[in-house]
Amino acid sequence: MNILDIIEKKKNRKELSNEEIDFFIKKYTSDEIPDYQAAALIMAICINGMTQDEIVSLTNSMASSGEILDLSEISNNIVDKHSTGGVGDKVTLIVSPIVSALGVPIAKMSGRGLGITGGTIDKLESIPGYKTNISIEDFKKNVKEIGISLIGQTLNLAPADKKIYALRDAISCTNSIPLIASSIMSKKIAAGASSIVLDVTCGNGAFMKDKEQALKLAKMMSLIGKWSNRKVTCILTNMDEPLGKNIGNSLEIIEAVEALNGNMAKDVKEVILTISAYMMKLSGKFSNISDNKKKALEVIKNGKALEKFKELVKAQGGDVTYIEDLDKFEKAPIITPVISEREGYVEKLDAGIIGRAGVDLGIGRMNKEDEIDSRVGIRLEKKIGDKVKKGSILAYVHANNPEKAENCIKEMLKAYKIGNKKVIKKNVLEII
């Protein structure tokens, strides 16, 4: 068995065996297969797809490429949440402390930015001192003692996925259902969660551009969950426009903290309360979705959710004073407005265009070795349904040089469609 034969087989649309998939995962994880050969196979998978059996085999091989955590000493029902990614998606940063403050343990392993979608780990690392690469022992200790830990993929948890994840980003193979499903579910299996809520985004700013594709992905991940003895709920959410107001790493931390203080954009609130409610239900401690939403609002109002976030930051080495005083976050050297050229209502705000403009600013990576700039980003002042006048400020661009700022403004004006009708956007589309 060799990698060239496996590449050739998938290139010719043939089904790979469990042994061939396992061979690839083991050899690539141990650096016996170079990036260029792995990239060839990943591209063939992206173009030609995979059968259900191949996807399950790929998921299990990636999960088994490292340690699979046993968190039963902490709880018999650890609940996890994962998003398929989006522009301005800071949901994990808000939901996790809310649910943890209600007594549901949160043990979550997150990823970095992929394509135009932001990564929770990149955002958390914009808090000075916050460690995303703590040991498994400290991860468990934090969950046990304070009820929450958010970490990146360690060398011991799904290391194959960590390598493939970065490679996919660099070769434009981010929107493949087999690769997305196996990536997400291998991390969930490895991280030891027994119940999982999946935020499956669809729209211009997501990997799945339409609801039909998002449903296919959701059903595939549900199937993998069932085969792996996990309880899974999938929530389809709208990503045609960015979620919330801020796009960018430190900017999204700021918006998350503001949300935990009770200042939430309407679309963020709808998504946050829905995901929190279903995580609470899967925990077995809370049964009624409507009541669960009220309880989530209560821990925001009484400050317990924000305190839980501060506990998390402190436990993982972060400087809590940045959470207490958001003005401490370093600002981009250039902050400039995007001015509306006409009057009317915002009928469309293309999250895909904004996501790509954000990557050009330095929010994300064009190559897997690229460094991001946590200061840069975009703050939206007008969103779908809002009325604007000619000369109104639509958004602010936070940039690190004038040329990037100017290019971003041009792209932002393309992203906004100003028309004559007021559009009402639905944020939570379906629950599976």
Image: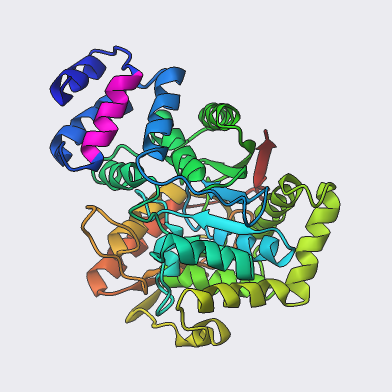
Asked if residue 243 can be seen in this view, the reply is: no
Name the residue nearer the viewer: 364 or 25: 25
Residue 224, image x, y percentages: 53, 29
* Residue name at image x 44 percent, y 76 percent: 127
* Residue name at image x 23 percent, y 69 percent: 403
323 relative to 151 in the view: left or right:
right
Residue 270, image x, y percentages: 70, 54
Q: Main secondary structure of the magenta part?
A: helix
**Stretch in magenta:** 18-28
Please check the rendered image and state whether residue 71 is part of the magenta-colored stretch, yes or no. Answer: no
Name the residue nearer the viewer: 74 or 158: 74
Q: Vertically, is 394 above or below 375?
A: above
* Residue name at image x 27 percent, y 21 percent: 20
* Residue name at image x 85 percent, y 54 percent: 291
Name the residue nearer the viewer: 9 or 403: 9
Q: Vertically, is 285 above or below 59?
A: below
Of the 4 image quadrants, the one containing the N terminus is top left
Q: How many callouts does the rendering have?
A: 0
318 relative to 325 in the view: left or right:
left
Name the residue nearer the viewer: 421 or 46: 46
Of the 4 image quadrants, the one containing the C terminus is top right
Asked if residue 30 can be seen in this view, the reply is: yes
Residue 362, image x, y percentages: 30, 64
